[in-house]
Image (tube, rainbow, N blue to C red):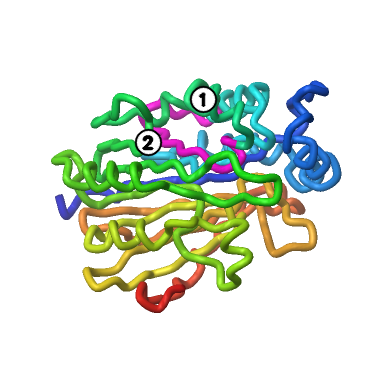
Amino acid sequence: MSGAAPVVVAHISDLHPTGIARFRPTDLLTKRALGWLNLALLRRKRHPYELLLRVMDDLRRDPPDQLVVGGDLVNLGVPEEFAASRELLGRSGLPAERISAVPGNHDRYTSDAHERRLFEVYFGAFARSAAPFPDDLFPFLQPRPGLTVLGLCSGWPASPIQARGTLGARQLGRLAELLRHPAARPPLVVAVHHPPIPHAEPLKQWLNGLHDWRALLELLAGTGAAILHGHRHLSLHWEVETPRGPLRVLGTPSASDQGGKSPRTAGYHRYRFGPDGFLGGERRIWNAAREAFELHELPVPERVRLEELR
């Protein structure tokens, strides 16, 4: 086993496809009205659809062993957006069993998107579990050659000013069950949309953070898991020291966010895993001038102690 080739995991998130949905007046009677303004004035320029095609073509040219999709596959949670992103993922050339997908806050943008289970309708094939629960897809357990993927749902309908995430006691309890499952063999890759590292500013954490981040990290302590997230549209890297061993937290940039005046750059990450866990990785960042992806090292990990995080 020691001579086996590393398992390659590609990590994309925050696709936010633009220019593919026609919104009816009734669509804009909810919080989508504010979202539509943001989409029309800002996001459409910053998130060109063509970049998503480039990412999928890159995945097809250099296919990973597993693709983890970290949520926010849509903007305002209408069926046309879900259908477009489902078609995009098909363009990668990867079969369903080599794609793992979890929802973000935009995939649960409104109560009707949540109640109609649009994420499940379009992406349920990428959230199938070896140990399914009878009433929900999440959390899921996916044993794959050389690693195990665990998927969580942190996206729920929120107020118009919030993009916060929550896992909830029931989902965390079920995750504890899956961690004891005989098929949950290390190394463990945990996919979740919101980062389990809190913002330094309490207001930002209340508006945009994962509210039960500490419960998740405490539950995963001792597993050596690598936690893959999106949401921040940035390349991020932490090593979290816990009383029962380290955890690695990796955030990938948005696949389509060119950033404007922000430090955001469109692209995605690729990681390597061996029997003993994380072996390293790279960033593939889009260079508009060269019309190509440039390879960069992952950010140097920021080392933090769980008990010091607030």
From the viewer's side, name the closer residue of 74 and 99: 74
Residue at left offset 58%, top offset 60%: 206
Q: Residues within 10 Å of mark 1 (few under 14, many from 20)?
A: some
x and y, in percent, of residue 114 in the image: 55, 30
x and y, in percent, of residue 112 in the image: 61, 26
106 left or right, relative to 94 = right
Q: Is residue 5 above or below residue 280?
A: above
x and y, in percent, of residue 188 in the image: 28, 50
Mark number displayed over residue 117:
1
Give the extent of the magenta segment. 90-108
Mark number displayed over residue 138:
2
Residue at left offset 62%, top offset 57%: 207
Which corner quadrant of the image does residue 213 belong to?
A: bottom left
Residue at left offset 84%, top offset 39%: 40
From the viewer's side, name the closer residue of 249 and 120: 120
Q: Amino acid at mark 2?
A: Phe
